[in-house]
Amino acid sequence: MLRLAIQKSGRLSEDSLALIRECGINFLSTSYKLKTEATNFPLEILFLRDDDIPGYVKDGVADLGIVGQNVLVEAGYPNLEVEALGFSKCRLSLAVPRADAYPSIEALQGKNIATSYPNILGRYLAGQGVQATLHTISGSVEIAPSIGLAEAICDIVSSGSTLLGNGLREVETVFRSEAVLIAQPNLTAEQTDLLEQLRFRMQAVRRAKRSKYILLNAPVTALEEVRRLLPGIKSPTVTPLAEAGWVSVQSVVQEDDFWHITSQLKAVGAEGILVLPIEKMIS
């Protein structure tokens, strides 16, 4: 059995549990239990503080973990990462009071900066040739300038609304982060096989989220142009229609390219375009 550690509450926890369920793994989740066992896959889930997860995985208390890259890198264990998961994306940014001038990073020379990520920030400032005094605090970093603790802060930003609500503005992106799957380095052969099975499922789910299944009707005269626009996984599926001179085309398109490709398909004569979500996609 594999032991997987995830954050016990918050958005990262919700997204992690959703991914596990989308992988076809069933388990009972309750608000008061700190661990649960899957019913159809050899997996035990531990609910822990996110800051503790990298250390538990490194020490072998947990075999796997899902954690933000920011937490992993700050803890000093980036080598534990085995898979970027594509959700819970955020950035670690420097912010200053909105009324303060900020011509460049050199404006922070000799200043006090409050942060929960002194290691990441320290390396960033060193790379910029800036020396500052870092005050490490575990929470409510945004309040530091208003109480006189620091002239700037460095904290996790998603939408920026928290900074705005505290009279701050974002001035530098220090580090970009997303959720990652991590593993302890001394898995047995059986555990490694289970890890690969889990990664296979996760990759299939992620691949499906990035893709759409598209069906359309097109005149035969436009088929070569449609095929050029819709390469699919290998090539599109083409089926003759009852109406002479027309075909049905089925393919897969990337979410990011969908609207652009759809407008091009219409321009070459495609009609009745139907778009469907994909639950899993195995390549």
Image (cartoon, rainbow, N blue to C red):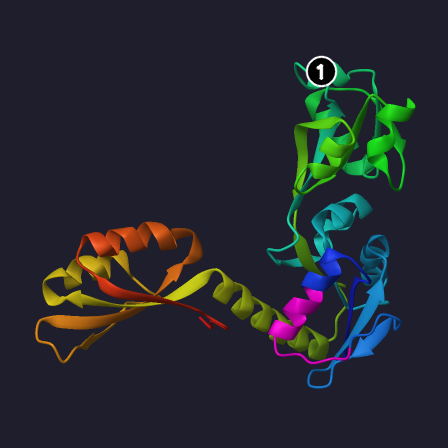
Res 115 → quadrant: top right
Element type at marker 1? Answer: helix
192 with respect to 75 (left or right): left
Magenta residues span: 16-28
In the foreground, 263 or 114: 263
Q: Which residue is drawn at 87% across and 29% down?
A: 144
Count of numbered marks? 1
Instruction: Give the residue at x 73% y 17%.
Output: 99
Kind of residue at disc 1: Glu
Whether residue 62 is situated above or below residue 142 in the rendered picture? below
Seen at 83% across and 15% down, the residue is: 110
Residue 62 x, y percent position in the rendering: 82, 67
Residue annotated with mark 1: 106
Q: Nearer the viewer, residue 248 or 55?
A: 248
**In the rendered image, which quarter contains the C terminus?**
bottom left
Residue 77 in the image: state x and y as whole percent: 77, 51
**Horizontal and vertical percent for residue 236?**
27, 68
* Residue 27 belongs to the span the image colors magenta: yes
- Mark 1: few/some/many CA within 10 Å (<14, 14-19, 20+): some
